[in-house]
Amino acid sequence: MIEKNNNPLVSRAVADLAQSSYVGALIYPAIFCTVIYATGYQSMPPTFTIVCMCVMVMACIGRLLLAVEHNNIESIVWVRWFSLLTLVIVSSWSSFWAYAIYTDGLNQTTLISIAASVGIASAGIGTLAPFLKLSYAVMYILMWPSGLVLSIQPDGVGTAYAVMLLIGSFFLSFVNVRLHKQYWITRRNEGL
């Protein structure tokens, strides 16, 4: 939906995303730290944990700075940087938890990570509704790596969870399209 010209609807969508970035940029590292420190996962392996955390925090800081400056940056450039930083954040999150599931299998902590990933993906499709491709990318990056790792677990339970993630992602895909259409219809109708 992003257009090359800097029309008022795209500017409004950028302002909406900038507003949601303030809380959104803080939630990823907060949930990540809470889960890994409450469950002892910070020592799994420490270097990988620190790298994922640092990348996530730096990208979140970048998103905060971008949100503050959203009025001073051309909309298409803003969306590209926002998209890049968002994809870095969710890739860091997803890489860590896919690795945790691969090394430790299903346990209480990795199940919490799956639930958190689905929750963040669900929230993301609402927040990112103006930009359908980004919304899809975030959802799939959050859910599919864990699902793929679950599918290769030696027991059938991992496969069951993988199938649930696959079905859930298809359901969220339909919700995603609906929210995207509703967002733009609402914004167009506001302009009438």
Image: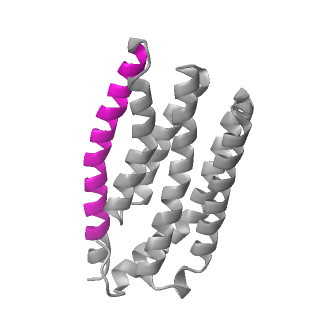
Vertical relation: 18 (above or below) 113:
below
Vertical relation: 25 (above or below) 68:
above
Residue 130 visible here: yes
Query: Viewed as shown, does residue 150 lie left or right of 47?
Result: left
Q: Position of residue 48 (x, y in %)?
A: 66, 41
Quarter of the image where one finds residue 142: top left
49 or 179: nearer the eye? 49
Q: Magenta stretch: residue 191 in it?
A: no
34 or 42: nearer the eye? 42
* Chain part drawn in magenta: 157-185
Q: Magenta stretch: residue 168 in it?
A: yes
Give the main secondary structure of the magenta stretch: helix
Vertical relation: 69 (above or below) 20:
below
Quarter of the image where one finds residue 1: bottom left
Query: Which residue is painted at 37% across and 78% down in the image?
Result: 10
Q: How many marks?
A: 0
Query: Which residue is painted at 55% across and 36% down in the image?
Result: 97
Q: Position of residue 124 (x, y in %)?
A: 44, 52
Query: Which residue is painted at 25% across and 62% down in the image?
Result: 181
